[in-house]
Amino acid sequence: MSALDIQKMSVQDRLEMMEAIWESFSYEQIDIDSPDWHQNILEKRKQKLESANAEFVTIETLKEYR
């Protein structure tokens, strides 16, 4: 199945396919290392939290950024 075939599917069908794929991972023992950039982002976020410089927004405010 190509990306073009997938793109022709309805949104609902694509979401159901993604859900099935994610669920399939739960049946396997997969050991994937996170990339270094991911660890860097987590460390920066932790520093913001610890220094009280983190900014929190409501889900409603977040939706306004769309």
Image (cartoon, rainbow, N blue to C red):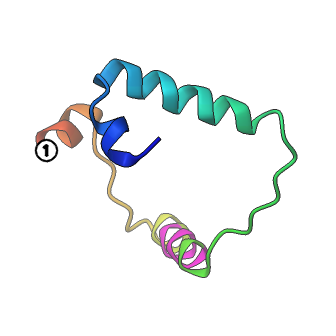
Label 1: element kind: loop
Q: Position of residue 49 (x, y in %)?
A: 49, 64
Q: Which residues are magenta?
A: 39-45
Left or right of 10, for residue 32: right
Magenta region includes residue 18: no
What residue sits 43% from the left and 65% below the top? Answer: 52
| Residue nearest the viewer, comparing 62 with 18 | 18
Determine crowd level at label 1: few under 14, some 14-19, many 20+ residues with C-alpha closer than 10 A.
Answer: few
Residue sticking out furthest to the right: 29
What residue sits 73% from the left and 39% below the top? Answer: 25
Mark 1, residue position: 66
Image quarter of residue 53: bottom left
| Residue nearest the viewer, comparing 61 with 54 | 61
Image quarter of residue 21: top right
What residue sits 52% from the left and 74% below the top? Answer: 47
Q: Is residue 18 above or below residue 50?
A: above
Magenta region includes residue 41: yes
Query: In the rendered structure, which amino acid carries the disc numbered 1?
Result: Arg
Task: Locate the C terminus by quadrant.
Answer: top left
| Residue nearest the viewer, comparing 46 with 15 | 15
What residue sits 77% from the left and 34% below the top? Answer: 26
Q: Is residue 45 above or below residue 18?
A: below
Q: Position of residue 28 (x, y in %)?
A: 84, 41
Most frequent secondary structure within the magenta stretch: helix
